[in-house]
Image (spheres, rainbow, N blue to C red):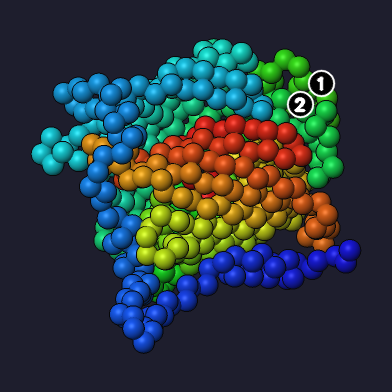
Amino acid sequence: MKRFTLLSLALLFFAASAALAQAPKKRRLVKPGPKAKEELVKPEPKTKEDILKTVDRPVPTEGLLARLMRAITINTPNGPLIPFPVVDSSKDLGPSFGVMPVLAVKDKKTGDIRSVIVPSVSYNENLRTTLTYRHYIFPDEKRYFILRASRSERVERELMSYYYTPDVFSSGIRLSAEVKHWITGKPSFYGFGINSKRGKKANYALQMTGEEVILDLPLIKHLFVNFNHSYFDKRINGGPVDNGQVKEIFPKDYAEASELRTFHSNRFSLVYDDTDHPFLPKIGTYASASVLYSNKKLGSDYEYRTYSFQMKNYYNYKEEGRFVTAVHSLLQFQRGDALPFYAMPQLGESTGLRMAGDGRFTARGKFVFNIEERITLSKTPFLKFISETEIAPFLDVGTVFDKVSGFRARDLKYGPGISARLVIRPQLVATVDFAYGSEGTNAIIKIGYPF
């Protein structure tokens, strides 16, 4: 097979996404026969606003989910408390189980949900008992706060705060800021390249402490210049899984990665975004082209550049708001100094290929294509809290490579699966993914859409 050039590969993935982003054709009136009355066919909506009006249309009847939620809900003076069980089966850490009560705190004046408190306790054979506190705060329909703290008996720790606003001081500038100290024992390293072996799986704990600020500056309607600044100190240590550690299987890579390193990077992007919601999109397109650079003169331990081209499209079928075809594509590659494996592009559970464990494939570049059909099963007007249930069959496709000219279609990995979701207005979605493929099966429980 002939090698792809950088330009041809970039055009390939943009063309694939654009093909799915074409506007739907208008439906025609059906002409009556000689003895038939005229059959009126409702035209498709002409604008995004028309579509969103039907998407937000309330359902007058209470569904099965609402009746089930009402049966297990405990009413408190501050709002409804719903005790959810937690059952997970991670490819990296094995099964986990526990309980996660969800408390929706209502505004006493309006009755709207303004924050959600989600503590949990869970048990995993490798991490042992984990206590987590999550607090989601919604000052309005767009702004968003997250506070999170977590501690496991073994290895894992987290302190994190996050803020997002789409309109700083009514200027049109979008801002997100995050500060965190995080130690995770979930990822593994298998070696470099698409041909790395599953039998080489080596667990480790990644530690990172620092901050990240992202600004979107509006140019014209839907077009932004994005600036991303981040400063993190990172290193790895021994992980919680006893049957295989990076220190034992990849001692040379461990020696480099276990040293505390500073990563000070700045990324500039040109972004087009006309999606209807920053976290729960139903319609629109998001596209970006970016370059990230790290310079030793600015305090970083490495000098390198990362180039990324990304597109996301959400096509809302007809005017019903029930079927949303979501498409994501990403091309990413690095130039410059050789980095520790944890700082290189990776393809796995949280990075585009849900059938695989985190960190399954590592190289200097990667290509990802994802498509899923998000089908709304019901809109449940339950306490203005859990408002939609959704099911989404999906397909993940991806590969990694040392350089773009080394991309091979035969190296692509395919991972079909299905997701079940609860949409929690105004900003959250709880997701359970089941994926399978050449890497076996994987079950994932998380907060947020994959893209």
Residue 180: % across, % down: 48, 34
Q: Which mark is residue 396?
A: none
- Say what secondary structure mark 2 lies in: strand
- Say what secondary structure mark 1 lies in: helix
- Asked whether the beta carbons under mark 2 and mark 1 sit within 8 Å of each other, the answer is yes
Q: Quadrant of residue 340?
A: top right
Is any part of residue 396 visible from this angle? yes
Judged from this view, the residue extending furthest toward the front is 35
Disc 2: which residue: 202
Instruction: Please state which of the two labelled residues, at mark 2 or mark 1, is closer to the viewer.
Output: 2
Total marks placed: 2
The Cα–Cα distance between marks 2 and 1, rounded to whole angstroms, is 8 Å
Is any part of residue 113 visible from this angle? no
> For the residue marked with disc 1, what is the amino acid?
Glu
Q: Which mark is residue 248?
A: 1
Between 1 and 117, the one nearer to me in the picture = 1
